[in-house]
Amino acid sequence: MVHQTNIVESEAKIVPVGWNAPPSNVHIVPSPVVNVDTGTEVSFQIGAKDSDGDDISLDLAYGDKSSDFEHDLTGDTTAIQSTATSHTFEKAAVYQIVLVANDSHNSSIASIGLIVLTESGGISTTVLIIVAVAAVAVVAVVAVLMMRRKKGPKKEEGDVQLPM
Ligand SMILES: [Ca+2]
């Protein structure tokens, strides 16, 4: 006859009364600033950890009045946990994206800025900016060349005279 013994392992957590470690390592990836075009689906990796092993609820606000993305991270671990989500921004603007991690005692916050550029006539604003910078550079090079020509050695005329 085989006897099985169930061994229950547990870790003792000594937490002083009234003391809590708030969620740490609260993160949003990509970070810190992203440039995207309107209508582009942007992927986010978000997460946190709790050194007490508390459950963490994540609340990600996109800053565009759409519904927040909410996700619960299960406790029992003090490792950094994360999850993924994505969102499409329809209007060109600068968005402040805020992630709140709550362990039911305290909240910790992380945020990033996200720049959404509009498209006009199929040419993105980024391309227009690059073209504008390139045009300024060309003008600068032409100006330098013209200044060098003016400073160059002057040709003296009338020095050479043939004897009669
Ligand atoms: Ca905690």
Image: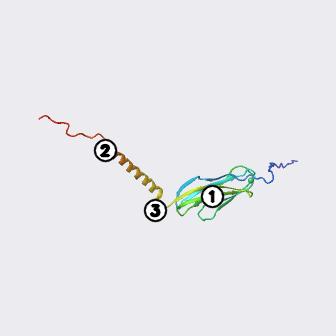
Observer-nearest of 159 and 72: 159
Mark 2: few/some/many CA within 10 Å (<14, 14-19, 20+): few
Q: Distance between the residues labelled 1 and 2?
A: 57 Å
What amino acid does circle 3 point to? Ser
Find numbered disc 3 in the image and state the secondary structure of the residue it sits on.
strand
Q: Which residue lies furthest to the right in this view?
A: 1
> Can you identify the residue that label 1 sits on?
98
Mark 1: few/some/many CA within 10 Å (<14, 14-19, 20+): some
What amino acid does circle 1 point to? Val
Residue 30: x %, y % from top left:
59, 53
Observer-nearest of 21 and 28: 21
What amino acid does circle 2 point to? Lys
Observer-nearest of 5 and 9: 9
Find numbered disc 1 in the image and state the secondary structure of the residue it sits on.
strand
User: Which quarter of the figure has residue 164?
Assistant: top left
Find numbered disc 2 in the image and state the secondary structure of the residue it sits on.
helix
Of badges 3 and 1, nearer the viewer stands 1
Q: Judge from the rendering whether residue 48 lies leftward or rightward of residue 30; answer left or right.
A: right
**Mark nearer the N terminus (3 vs 1):** 1
Q: Are marks 3 and 1 in contact (CB under 8 Å)?
A: no
Q: Residue 107 carries which label?
A: none
Q: Judge from the rendering whether residue 10 lies leftward or rightward of residue 127; answer left or right.
A: right
Q: In this view, does 39 lie above or below 13?
A: below
Of badges 2 and 3, nearer the viewer stands 2
Which residue shows up at 31% across the image and 44% down it?
150
Mark 3: few/some/many CA within 10 Å (<14, 14-19, 20+): few
Residue 15: x %, y % from top left:
79, 50
> Can you identify the residue that label 3 sits on?
120
Which residue shows up at 58% across the image and 52% down it?
32
**Mark nearer the N terminus (2 vs 3):** 3
> Can you identify the residue that label 2 sits on?
150
